[in-house]
Image (cartoon, rainbow, N blue to C red):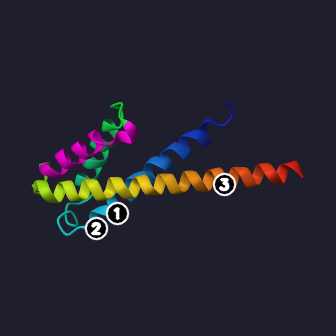
Amino acid sequence: MKQKLRLILYSFGIWGSYFLYFYTTFYAFDFTADLGVTAGLIAFALSSLSMGIPTNGGMGPWQVAVIAALSLYHVDHVSAVAFATGVFFLQSIWVIACGLFGIGALALRKDKNKQ
């Protein structure tokens, strides 16, 4: 591996961006807006660990992990379910959109290289 530092920096950048995206969604709901960074880190860490469970895109275990984390901070169950479902849906749509953009960009780049 020629550029180890670059790999490490990109890894931290990706995880940092993912956390900031997740934490920003706390401000979209009144019941999570005041929880703070610690609650965000705990919910993020549990949700990230849950992605190791072999399911389709983490569906199910991810929501359970986020709901469990929010319940540690006394968020009622219905609100925690609404948060977990909404954030999972938006993240899934974002990943799909970025993937489609990437496929399109690669196709255009490949066509450009042929000429």
Q: Quadrant of residue 64 in the image?
A: top left
Residue 28 lies in the magenta-colored region: no
Residue 66 lies in the magenta-colored region: yes
Q: Position of residue 39 (x, y in %)?
A: 22, 53
Give the residue displayed 69% in from the left and 33% down from the top: 2
Q: Which residues are magenta?
A: 56-71
> Callout 2: helix, strand or loop?
helix
The three-letter code of the residue at mark 1 reads Thr
Cα distance between the residues tagged 2 and 3: 33 Å
> Callout 1: helix, strand or loop?
helix
* Badge 3 density bin: few <14, some 14–19, many ≥20, Cα 10 Å: few
Q: Write down the residue under mark 2.
A: 27
Decide whether the magenta segment is chiefly helix, strand or loop.
helix
Cα distance between the residues tagged 1 and 3: 28 Å
* Badge 2 density bin: few <14, some 14–19, many ≥20, Cα 10 Å: some
Cα distance between the residues tagged 2 and 1: 6 Å
Q: Write down the residue under mark 3.
A: 104
Q: Nearer the viewer, mark 1 or mark 3?
A: 3
Give the residue displayed 84% in from the left and 50% down from the top: 113
Of the image marks 1 and 3, the number of the one nearer the N terminus:
1
Question: In what quadrant of the picture does the N terminus appear?
Answer: top right
Q: Circles 2 and 3: CB distance less than 8 Å?
A: no
Left or right of 6? Residue 23 is left
- Count the numbered circles shown: 3
Q: Circles 2 and 1: CB distance less than 8 Å?
A: yes
Give the residue displayed 66% in from the left and 54% down from the top: 104
Q: Write down the residue under mark 1.
A: 24
Res. 89 visible in picture? yes
Q: Position of residue 3 (x, y in %)?
A: 66, 37
The three-letter code of the residue at mark 3 reads Gly
